[in-house]
Amino acid sequence: MTNGNGAPLENAAPPQLNVLAQYVKDLSFENPNSPNSLAPQEKQPAINIQINVTAKALAENDYEVALAIEGKAEAEGALLFGFELVYAGVFRVLNVDQENLHPLIMIECPRLLFPFAREIVASSVRNGGFPPMMLDPVDFVGLYRQNMARQGEQIRPS
């Protein structure tokens, strides 16, 4: 960090992002057509995944960030399985300026949570009798931009 003249700031504390806790907030797995749904399928099932990120302030520097992942697999119009996971973390953010705080919370925090949520989804699907579902990496920057654009459209008068 520098002052306006390009000289380094002597007493500027470095930005900090700490994970205080992470946990499953909600988990549901459905296998409504078993055992028929466990039979070998002639073709690959259609898989639909939706991901959402929410955040709320808990204290001056502490935030709960929740990564919601919902998915289902269907074959020939029948639901093979469905799941919902809300995986959350409590993060402490220090020494981050206001303009960078929202992107940090909505991009970096879910990026830190995602590998753990991915493992929970894979294990849940495997424990339901199916091959483990390995979610593809998520572009949280792109997701953030989409959400900000969508919010901008909702704010604008028609």
Image (spheres, rainbow, N blue to C red):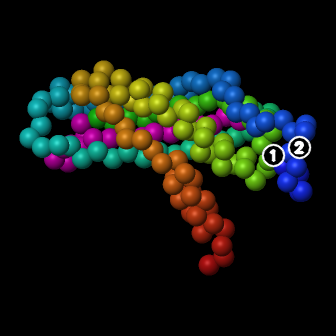
Find the magenta span and give its range: 63-80
Query: Which residue is at 66% across, 49% downward?
Result: 103
Q: Is label 2 in a helix, a strand or a loop?
A: loop
Q: Mark 2 and 1 residues: CB-CB less than 8 Å, in contact?
A: yes
How packed is label 2: few (under 14 Cα within 10 Å), some, or many (20 or more)?
few
Dot 2 amino acid type: Leu
Q: 6 above or below 88?
A: below
Total labels: the figure holds 2
Q: 29 above or below 9?
A: above
Q: Is residue 35 left or right of residue 27?
A: left
The quadrant of the rendering that contains the C terminus is bottom right
Q: Is label 1 in a helix, a strand or a loop?
A: loop
Out of 121 and 15, give the one closest to the viewer: 15
On the image, the x and y values in percent for residue 10 come to 90, 39
Instruction: Give the labeled residue for mark 2.
Output: 9
State how far apart marks 2 and 1 are (Cα): 6 Å
Out of 78 and 155, give the one closest to the viewer: 155
On the image, the x and y values in percent for residue 46 come to 24, 47
Instruction: Give the labeled residue for mark 1.
Output: 1
Query: Which residue is at 87% across, 39% downward?
Result: 12
On the image, the x and y values in percent for residue 24 come to 53, 25
The first of marks 2 and 1 along the sequence is: 1
